[in-house]
Structures are given as C-alpha cells and as structure tokens.
Image (spheres, helix red, strand yellow):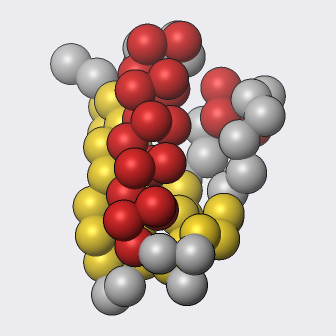
Amino acid sequence: MAAIIVERACGCFRNSDFQQETQCETVDEALAKADEMCIIMNEDFCHKHKFKTEYVDGNVMIKMVMNG
C-alpha cells in the first residue's frame, strides 16, 4: 500500500473533489494518480500555486509552491 498525501490544501483544493489522503495498492499506481491530480490542479485551479509530486518514505506527496 502507498498513500497519496497532499501536503497543504489551498482553497481551490478544498473546493475540489480530491481527498487530502488517498490509498493506492502500489507505489506505481500512487505515482500515476498523483501525477494526474497535479496536471488537473495545475491546469484547472486558480494558478496561484504550482503542484508537483515527490516520493517520500514509500508514499507520494503532492507539494504546493507559490507560482511566480
């Protein structure tokens, strides 16, 4: 099991259908799903933040940084 964990939930994230933590069967599945989530968040959210994935201790973190 591997988890996708969103490090910080901005307002756009809280208003979305995404969960702050999601369990996946494998790390590969978690990485693929987290990458897909980041693409959607980077394209559809307000663009104040940029989201990227990072593998940490067997889990996948979605990190948020200020855009610009």
Quadrant where the C terminus is found in the figure: top left
- Decide if residue 63 is in sight here: no
When asked about the image quadrant of residue 48, the answer is top left
- Decide if residue 47 is in sight here: yes
Q: Is residue 6 left or right of residue 68?
A: right
Look at 30% across and 78% down and name the residue there. Answer: 56
Where residue 66 appears, as percent x and y from the top left, is 32, 31
Look at 55% across and 84% down and name the residue there. Answer: 1
Please tell me which residue lies in front, 67 or 41.
Answer: 41
Look at 40% across and 26% down and name the residue there. Answer: 39
Look at 32% across and 52% down and name the residue there. Answer: 53
When asked about the image quadrant of residue 20, the answer is bottom right
Q: Is residue 65 left or right of residue 19?
A: left
Where residue 51 appears, as percent x and y from the top left, is 37, 37
Q: Is residue 62 left or right of residue 17?
A: left
Where residue 49 appears, as percent x and y from the top left, is 40, 27
* Vertical arrangement, residue 30 with respect to residue 57, above or below: above
* Vertical arrangement, residue 9 with respect to residue 57, above or below: above
Please tell me which residue lies in front, 61 or 32.
Answer: 32
